[in-house]
């Protein structure tokens, strides 16, 4: 008996070599290809109960808070929201008119008209994901038609994109993740460039603009629709500071995301509308 | 005395009644699985923003404990599996934590006879070193795959794990003894 024990307890060198030999190809495959995406999606379903249990304390906390909110507070909020809806409805009327006009003008030029984007509200699941990266977990998954690469926004602007899905949850990589890049253009003059995440919670960088570029503090950056991943025209960030170093050929530009990345409890998943060519005659009849 | 040594470790050696031995083994498995499950939950429970970098590496701590207490049962295999589950939960590169946790398990098993003799505070330092080695591996992988944001805060889990170790050790030891003593 003691012989067997002594033999078994010696350092498991064979096992560690086996584990290393298994892990490294796994990481390479996961990084370089999409073969593991489905397997990950299936296994994530098994993990979901753990994540659910982990998010319960937060949910209970919020629930208790809501229970003790007084009637008066709700009435005030209701009143405020009612007024807001009225304002938004007024703005919507103008928007609709402009949209119709835009479609008509596009038809005259025989250009493709955009159909409005579809959106779905998803709620955050409050769990910790990979430390020191910028990711979120939400409660909508492939069952709701979510797909990898889908754009995610909040009320103010683009938040990021879906990078992982399972049947009932999906992972969002935020704009600020060090591995994230998004094609944008300056709203003021249409200057196109690419906006990168830095890893800091509220900072983005524009590394590819030269000292002669027409960009100033406070410029709003919107999605350009290049690469076809993000729908065009959504606000992304605002230029915060521009540093010009005579020794560097590129400007050092810091931009802040306009979406409230760390405060949103609910996010919107966007299905970009498909482009359709509006026939000229029908548009003229209107 | 042997009865007090708790599930596994002493391995009374005289398992005259095989049925009883099996029962004990099952109970051990349940205790181990439950402790790992709790560690996994604690690993993803949301913390206030300021406390986030100080989150101890719960799974690594529980893994090190079982590797030192029952190296025949819990070693590299458990480490790899738990690491893979952590990878799935965190959405990180598959195999990143699996590699780190298997190395941690290997080192814990390799040194378990020596470290068992240490006083708790010295054990804590050993545990901190193992956790830091695990972090170094995940940070290297992140650096290679381009997902790295370098801050010194990234090494904080080693410190918080070190502080937590004595309490966790005492709790897990008592649980193990209770599960055996019945």
Image (cartoon, coloured by chain):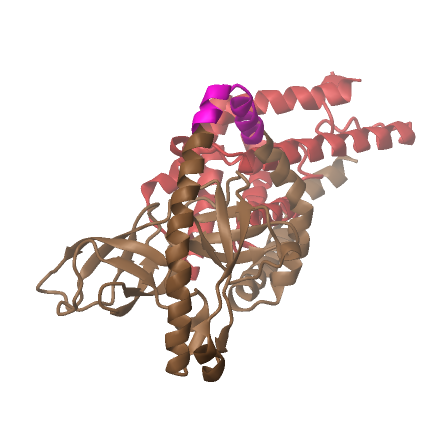
Residue A35 in view here: yes
User: What is the number of callouts on the image?
Assistant: 0
Q: Nearer the viewer, residue A273 or B146?
A: A273
Q: Position of residue A76 (x, y in %)?
A: 43, 26
Q: Position of residue A129 (x, y in %)?
A: 50, 44
Q: Residue furthest top?
A: B1
Residue drawn at (53%, 25%), measured in percent from left and top? A66
Q: Nearer the viewer, residue A134 or B24?
A: A134
Find chain B in the image and tell me its colour.
Answer: red
Q: Is residue A195 left or right of residue A137?
A: left
**Magenta-colored span:** A57-76
Residue B169's place in the image compared with A5, above or below, is above
Q: Position of residue A198 (x, y in %)?
A: 32, 53
> Quadrant where the N terminus of chain A lies?
top right
Q: Is residue B7 left or right of residue B86?
A: right
Q: What's the magenta bit mostly, secondary-structure-wise?
A: helix
| B78 within the magenta span | no
Find chain A in the image and tell me its colour.
Answer: brown
Q: Is residue A216 left or right of residue A106?
A: left
């Amino acid at each position: 008996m003691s012989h067997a024990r002594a033999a078994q307890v010696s350092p498991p060198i064979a096992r560690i070599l086996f584990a290393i030999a298994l892990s490294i190809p796994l990481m390479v495959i996961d990084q370089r290809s999409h073969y593991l995406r489905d397997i990950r999606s299936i296994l994530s379903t098994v993990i979901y109960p753990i994540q659910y249990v982990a998010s319960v304390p937060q949910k209970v906390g919020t629930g208790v808070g809501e229970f003790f909110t007084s009637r008066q507070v709700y009435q005030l909020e209701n009143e405020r929201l009612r007024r807001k809806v009225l304002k938004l409805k007024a703005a919507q009327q103008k928007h609709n008119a402009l949209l119709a006009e835009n479609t008509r003008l596009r038809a005259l030029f025989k250009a493709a008209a955009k159909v409005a984007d579809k959106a779905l509200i998803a709620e955050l699941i409050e769990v910790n994901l990979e430390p020191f990266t910028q990711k979120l977990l939400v409660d909508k998954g492939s069952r709701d038609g979510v797909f990898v690469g889908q754009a995610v926004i909040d009320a103010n602007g683009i938040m990021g994109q879906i990078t992982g899905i399972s049947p009932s949850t999906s992972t969002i990589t935020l704009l600020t993740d060090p591995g994230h890049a998004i094609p944008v253009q300056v709203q003021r003059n249409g200057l196109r460039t690419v906006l990168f995440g830095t890893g800091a919670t509220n900072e983005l960088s524009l590394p590819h603009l030269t000292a002669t570029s027409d960009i100033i503090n406070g410029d709003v950056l919107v999605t350009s629709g290049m690469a076809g991943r993000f729908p065009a025209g959504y606000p992304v960030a605002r230029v915060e500071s521009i540093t010009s170093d005579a020794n560097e050929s590129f400007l050092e530009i810091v931009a802040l995301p306009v979406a409230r990345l760390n405060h949103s409890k609910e996010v919107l998943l966007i299905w970009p509308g498909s482009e359709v060519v509006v026939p000229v005659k029908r548009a003229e009849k209107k | 005395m042997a009865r007090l040594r708790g599930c596994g470790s002493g391995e009374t050696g005289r398992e005259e009644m095989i049925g009883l031995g099996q029962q004990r083994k099952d109970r051990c498995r349940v205790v181990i699985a439950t402790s790992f499950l709790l560690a996994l939950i604690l690993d993803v429970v949301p913390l206030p923003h300021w406390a986030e970098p100080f989150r101890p590496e719960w799974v690594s701590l529980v893994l090190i404990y079982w590797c030192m207490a029952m190296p025949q049962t819990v070693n590299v295999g458990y480490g790899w599996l738990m690491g893979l589950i952590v990878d799935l939960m965190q959405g990180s590169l598959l195999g990143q934590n699996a590699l780190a946790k298997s190395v941690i398990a290997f080192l814990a098993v390799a040194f378990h006879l020596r470290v068992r003799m240490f006083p708790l505070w010295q054990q804590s330092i050993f545990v901190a070193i193992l956790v830091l080695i695990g972090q170094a591996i995940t940070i290297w992988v992140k650096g290679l795959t381009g997902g790295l944001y370098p801050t010194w805060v990234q090494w904080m889990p080693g410190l918080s794990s070190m502080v937590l170790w004595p309490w966790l050790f005492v709790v897990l030891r008592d649980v193990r003894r209770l599960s055996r003593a019945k």
